[in-house]
Amino acid sequence: MSRKYKATIPDKAYFITITCVNWIDVFTRLNHRYTIINSLKYCQENKGLEVFAYCIMPSHIHLICSADNGKKLSDIIRDFKTFTSKQLIENIKNEPESRREWLLEQFEKACEHLKRKQEFKVWQDDYHAEIIETPQFMYQKLNYIHNNPVVEKIVEKPENYIFSSARNYADLDNELEVFLLPKQLITFN
């Protein structure tokens, strides 16, 4: 398993992307987006996750985050992926879902190559993590995250997307509290 794009250095912030298998657009459903929000809140309150920015896209999640008090960000992300996988499958099975059979089939097929027995696989192996070493890189990724829904034509302005920290930075009601970076360096262009 490659460590090139893993959050392995303690006390550092990372730009992280976590993607669903086959880029399945599972986060088009409100209940699934709230599974992610609630899980991030839990990780903030109980596992030491510090979130500076986030955006939940239809098939993936972007974060700028770190772990506090010497905790391992890689462990937090692992636990987050494990819990949300189980919770998302439960949601799909038990809540109204027009694509139930198709989604479960896709997540089941994603397990075919695995050596260990597993019924469903929601997330791609690993995740993409890039260490944030400069303020310029941090703000470039912050703007990328916030503009992602605009580029995908989900909204016209970053702050209009409910499931993004762009709302936090625009001083609007939001779904998840984040540690705000200094505003003088933020642009939404």
Image: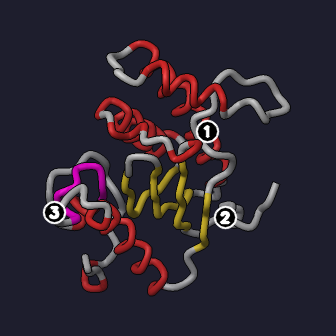
Q: Residues within 10 Å of mark 1 (few under 14, many from 20)?
A: some
- Badge 3: residue crowd in 10 Å (few <14, some 14–19, many ≥20): few
Q: Does residue 187 lie above or below 102 as drawn?
A: below
**In the picture shown, does residue 151 fall above or below 119?**
below
* Highlighted magenta segment, given as a residue range: 158-165
Q: Nearer the viewer, residue 26 or 105?
A: 105
Q: Marks 3 and 1, how far apart in space?
A: 30 Å
Q: Residue placed at 45% from the left, 58% from the top?
A: 62
In x, y percent, where is residue 140?
42, 80
Residue at x 61% of width, y 60% of height? 128
Residue, x 20% and y 58% (percent of image)?
A: 155
Calculate the distance from the C-alpha at mark 1 to the C-alpha at mark 2: 17 Å
Amino acid carrying label 3: it is Asp
Q: Residue furthest top?
A: 94
Secondary structure beneath label 3: loop
Numbered label attached to residue 104: none
Q: CA distance from mark 3 to mark 2?
A: 30 Å
Q: Which residue is mark 1?
A: 79
Q: How is the image coloured?
A: secondary structure
Quick check: 162 left or right of 136? left
Query: Which quarter of the figure is the C terminus placed in?
Result: bottom left
